[in-house]
Image (cartoon, rainbow, N blue to C red):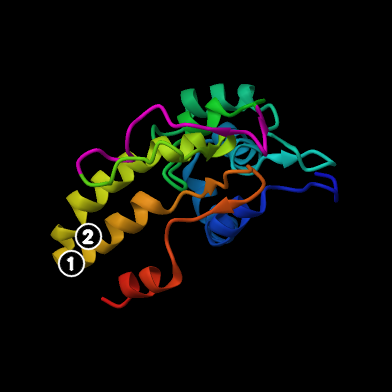
Amino acid sequence: MDSGYKVPEYLLKILARTLEFLVKNFEILRPRLHTFCVTSLKEVLCKGILPKCSQDETVATYLNFSSSCSQVNSICPPNFIHINGQTEKTLCLESGRNYQLNGCLRPTQTAINKQYCSPFSDKITYPSWLMTSVLIQNKTVSNIKLTYPGRNVSSSCVDKWVQITCNRIPFCSPDRKHLYVGVNKQQCEAALAW
């Protein structure tokens, strides 16, 4: 990778700890996996998590790693990757794709999760390069509602986390030059104060 490899700052911020964890623990996984799986998995993770920004920072491109995706899907255990709500299948859908960083789209669904989240405003749009994350949040909300109570998490705490998950994906400003997040510092601190 060249030293001028820039990535969208938002993705880097939310994935920094996950990436640190992967790097630290990859050697533990290595002996448990087939050599071809390890090699392909590295390429899918390295090229599929963070897209490369163009020099003028207007386009983000996921490098092409489709051949490694074929290897991961045929050799590695199924659903082995689970990063920020994405599996190897969703990461592989991004192979070779380009996104306009100032491109904003209206979501196709009416809410992140119709049962637990408020409906989208008619005026809200999301960055095109984050549309996969918008779609994935539906499952994340359902998983929180399903698994947290079984771990003795109070219903008020579960509800706080659901609301954060419903509103955590940044959306575009009306002029499409900035990103806004629907969760503020106080909401985040309240959710962490079990």
Q: Residue at x 18, y 67 (%)?
A: 156
Nearer to us in this view, 71 or 163: 163
Indicate the position of residue 102 as horizontal and vertical percent values.
Answer: 67, 38
Under tag 1, what secondary structure?
Answer: helix
Residue at 19% from the left image edge and 41% from the top image edge: 115
Q: Main secondary structure of the magenta part?
A: loop
| Residue beneath the point at 38% across and 75% down | 189
* Amino acid at the residue labelled 1: Ser
* Quadrant of the drawing holding the C terminus: bottom left
Residue 120 is tagged as: none
Residue 19 appears anywhere in the view: no
| Secondary structure category for the residue under label 2 | helix
Q: In this view of the protein, which residue sits in the foreground, 28 or 193?
A: 193
Q: Residue furthest bottom?
A: 193
Tell me if 98 is positioned left or right of 113 in this view. right
> Residue 92: x, y in percent?
54, 28
Horizontal side of 108 relative to 101 (left or right) equals left
Q: Residue 8 in the image: state x and y as whole percent.
A: 67, 48
Q: Amino acid at mark 2?
A: Asp
Q: Which residue is mark 1?
A: 156
Q: Which mark is residue 159?
A: 2
Number of residues whose C-alpha sits closer than 10 Å to that of mark 2, classed few (under 14), some (14–19) or many (20 or more)? some
What separation in Å lies between label 2 and label 1 (alpha carbons)? Answer: 5 Å
Residue at 60 percent of width and 53 percent of height? 10
Q: Residue 59, position in %: x, y?
A: 73, 35
For label 1, the crowd category at 10 Å Cα-Cα, with few meaning under 14, some 14 to 19 and many 20 or more, is few
Q: Do the numbered discs 2 and 1 sit on residues whose CB atoms are within 8 Å?
A: yes
Task: Provide the residue span drawn in magenta.
Answer: 98-115
